[in-house]
Image (cartoon, grey):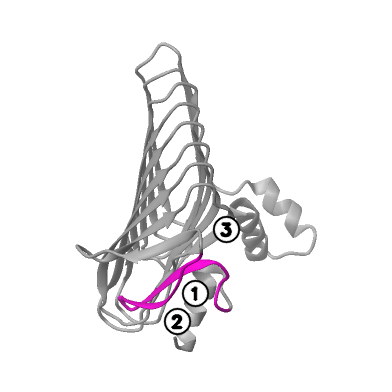
């Protein structure tokens, strides 16, 4: 891999070298490196572009890295990755896509990730998206995440997009079994004329299952964001969605929460707060010697931390 691709890997997966554990690194539409372990296998699909990641029951304290980097302008791909996570596992999965586009054509990566989470398993899933380049072509990423959780399982998703993605539609669909818990934490920052849409649908099918969907975002300049969160309470359960957004310049943010109780014992809550940076926050930091721009940057940094 060249220096540009290695820099992208650092941005999306915090990799400075070959990672420990299992990994599959994809560069410009092809497999660049792969490693399996005694408990985690990675197999190429034969019917479409993508891989199966098979995590054996009882696997503990192991990780899987599956980053994607694109440095060729005009490359467009759709990749399907399926995760089969056995019972009683405790694993961390790091994904993400970085695009470097200095050409005139659009570069696009659409990733479809499907998770089958076994009983009593715990999964931490980290996904970062990043774009750069001084060309006229756009950086486009449309990730889809599908989650099916067995009883007593736990999954925490951390998704981040803070720079260089011109257009994205992030779609997440989840079904929870008895006593399953799904925590989603999203961080998004847009600028220029970028467009970012987040579309979450969580079906709380199991008894005493739980979800918490949290989005924090900043829309700068002429960018636009849309946050949609649908939570369906189909059993005795608890669901909560929260959207906190800062708008700056001419940014636009739309928050569209939807909760549906199909069971008398479903407890569902949604919250949304959108506004500009408070004047007293700026004033306080400026009294410490910061310029207005520096104060804004500190507030945004802390908000998205």
Q: Position of residue 145 (x, y in %)?
A: 36, 50
Work out whether residue 226 or residue 142 is closer to the camera in this orientation and state it: 142
The residue depicted at 37 percent of the width and 62 percent of the height is 194
Q: Which image quadrant: the C terminus?
A: bottom right
Q: Badge 3, how many Cα within 10 Å: few under 14, some, many 20+?
A: some
* Residue 128 appearing in the image: no
Q: Position of residue 238 (x, y in %)?
A: 49, 24
Q: Which image quadrant: the N terminus?
A: bottom left
Q: Is residue 245 above or below residue 113?
A: above
* Residue 182 appearing in the image: yes
Q: Badge 2, how many Cα within 10 Å: few under 14, some, many 20+?
A: some
Can you tell which of label 3 and label 2 is closer to the viewer? 3
Work out whether residue 268 or residue 301 is closer to the camera in this orientation and state it: 268
Q: Is residue 183 above or below residue 109?
A: above
The residue depicted at 59 percent of the width and 49 percent of the height is 277
104 left or right of 219? left
Give the magenta part as a residue range.
Answer: 17-37
Q: Is tag 1's residue or tag 3's residue first in the polypeptide sequence?
A: 1
Element on which disc 3 rests: strand
Instruction: Quickly name the residue at label 3.
Output: 62
Instruction: Quickly name the residue at label 2.
Output: 5
Work out whether residue 223 or residue 88 is closer to the camera in this orientation and state it: 88
180 left or right of 295? left
Residue 27 within the segment the image draws in magenta = yes
Q: Which mark is residue 238?
A: none
Can you tell which of label 1 and label 3 is closer to the viewer? 3
State yes or no: discs 1 and 2 in contact (Cβ < 8 Å).
yes
Q: Is tag 3's residue or tag 2's residue first in the polypeptide sequence?
A: 2
Instruction: Quickly name the residue at label 1.
Output: 9
């Amino acid at each position: 891999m060249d220096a540009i691709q290695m820099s992208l890997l650092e941005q999306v997966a915090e990799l400075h070298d070959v990672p420990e554990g299992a990994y599959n690194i994809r560069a410009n539409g092809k497999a660049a490196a792969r490693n399996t372990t005694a408990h985690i296998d990675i197999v190429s699909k034969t019917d479409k572009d993508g891989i199966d990641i098979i995590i054996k029951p009882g696997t503990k304290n192991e990780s899987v890295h599956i980053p994607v980097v694109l440095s060729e302008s005009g490359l467009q791909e759709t990749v399907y990755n399926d995760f089969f996570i056995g019972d009683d596992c405790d694993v961390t999965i790091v994904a993400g896509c970085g695009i470097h586009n200095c050409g005139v054509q659009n570069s696009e990566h659409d990733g479809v990730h499907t998770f089958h989470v076994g009983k009593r398993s715990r999964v931490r899933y980290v996904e970062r998206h990043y774009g750069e380049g001084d060309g006229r072509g756009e950086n486009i990423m449309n990730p889809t995440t599908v989650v099916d959780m067995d009883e007593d399982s736990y999954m925490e998703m951390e998704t981040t997009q803070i720079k260089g993605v011109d257009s994205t539609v992030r779609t997440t669909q989840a079904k929870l079994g008895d006593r399953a818990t799904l925590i989603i934490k999203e961080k998004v920052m847009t600028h220029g004329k970028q467009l970012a849409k987040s579309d979450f649908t969580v079906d709380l099918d199991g008894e005493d299952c739980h979800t918490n969907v949290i989005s924090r975002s900043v829309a700068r300049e002429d960018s636009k964001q849309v946050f949609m969160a649908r939570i369906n309470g189909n059993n005795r359960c608890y669901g909560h969605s929260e959207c906190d957004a800062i708008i700056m310049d001419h940014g636009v943010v739309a928050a569209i929460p939807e909760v549906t109780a199909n069971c008398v014992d479903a407890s569902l809550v949604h919250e949304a707060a959108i506004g500009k940076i408070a004047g007293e926050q700026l004033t306080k930091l400026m009294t410490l010697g910061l310029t207005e721009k520096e104060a804004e940057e500190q507030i945004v940094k802390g908000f998205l931390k």
